[in-house]
Image: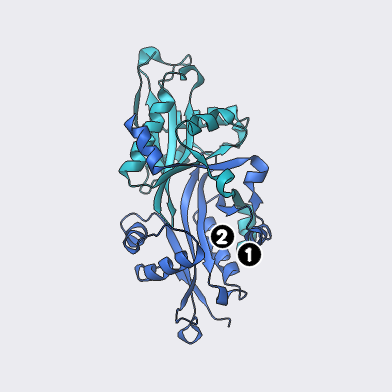
Chain colours: A blue, B cyan
């Protein structure tokens, strides 16, 4: 198997994107189809996606032709300007080893350069050595290690407490 | 001194925003790393598609800073997306001039940011903090922030422009 194409996701891809998000993560939270549709393909997209598609005769064992995706958006660094932020990146297990992941990363890199971004940022779990190696082989640097950055969150219930003060 | 207002930044504020960005960078001893110009800030924040949003804190003219500034603090944020839970508010930069600290400007900025996050149906507000910046870490922890790097092991990675170009050339 070597045939695949990478293309910009369209609104018709939302159910495949939701399926791949669910498969790529283990968790209790469930995103909703309607939100994904509105948030990505409404007047103001909050994210962008590329999908990897194979021909019908090479579909997955369950009959899917959309076999991988990458979700990204633009962020901003007050020192250097626009950045491309890679949020999610997944290729179905039966379609790995054919260069789909590398091609996705190439298209993302081209997008970053074309849109005049200074860098591509993303987070990786420290125990995900496979992904860390994949990215390091392609020139990624660990800013948490080098510069000591830690990611913090103030969840909704805490935000509401702040607004009530 | 207790009089200040918080308001949405306008295009006329870009020179003050850049000044405060540089002041914060100077405090981190990284001032020469700020390559962004007023023109970039104007285009990127007040064009057809804003890549960031800002609030600024302003004092009356009679309470201006020792160098004559009335815009004395700012917060820069934008919206990010979590495939599981949807929209998030990402706090990128947050700074109040030293001579105007201790008057509640920082707390008020955080309150307005929280209101914005709730109003725009964001599930959470995210931001990064340097692990040695104990003062900021305490400020945020007092307001309910959790350290996801510590709890979940997340590490921030970057592929810089020169490396991106190498990938595109393959």
Q: Which residue is depicted at the point 36% across and 61% down? A: A36
Tell me if I can see residue B66 in this picture. yes
Query: Marks 2 and 1: same chain?
Result: no
Quadrant containing the C terminus of chain A in the rendered view: top left
Q: Secondary structure at mark 2?
A: helix
Q: Secondary structure at mark 1?
A: helix
Position of residue B103 measured from the top left corner of the image (x, y, whole percent): 42, 18
Height in image: B42 above or below B155? above
Looking at the image, which is closer to me, A18 or A87? Answer: A18
Q: Which residue is depicted at the point 35% across and 27% down? A: B6
Q: Which residue is mark 2?
A: A109
Q: Chain of mark 1?
A: B
Q: Chain of mark 2?
A: A
Looking at the image, which is closer to me, B24 or B119? Answer: B119
Height in image: A104 above or below B154? below
**Which label belongs to residue B169?**
1
Q: Nearer the viewer, mark 2 or mark 1?
A: 2
Number of numbered discs:
2
Position of residue A88 measured from the top left corner of the image (x, y, whole percent): 50, 60
Height in image: A137 above or below B156? below
| Mark 2 → mark 1, Cα distance in angstroms | 10 Å
Looking at the image, which is closer to me, A108 or A93? Answer: A93
Q: Which residue is depicted at the point 63% across and 52% down? A: A126
Tell me if I can see residue B35 in this picture. no
């Amino acid at each position: 198997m070597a045939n695949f194409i990478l293309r910009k996701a369209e609104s018709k891809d939302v159910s495949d994107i939701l399926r791949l998000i669910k498969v790529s993560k283990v968790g209790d939270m469930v995103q909703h189809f309607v939100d994904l549709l509105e948030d990505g393909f409404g007047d103001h997209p909050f994210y962008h996606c590329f999908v990897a598609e194979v021909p019908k005769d090479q579909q997955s064992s369950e009959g899917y032709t959309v076999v991988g995706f990458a979700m990204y958006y633009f962020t901003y660094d007050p020192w250097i300007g626009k950045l491309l932020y890679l949020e999610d990146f997944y290729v179905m297990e039966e379609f790995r080893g054919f260069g789909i992941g590398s091609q996705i990363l190439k298209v993302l890199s081209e997008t970053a350069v074309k849109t005049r971004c200074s860098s591509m940022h993303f987070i990786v779990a420290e125990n995900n050595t496979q992904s860390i190696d994949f990215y390091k082989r392609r020139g990624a640097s660990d800013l948490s290690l080098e510069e000591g950055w830690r990611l913090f969150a103030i969840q909704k219930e805490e935000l509401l407490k702040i607004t009530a003060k």
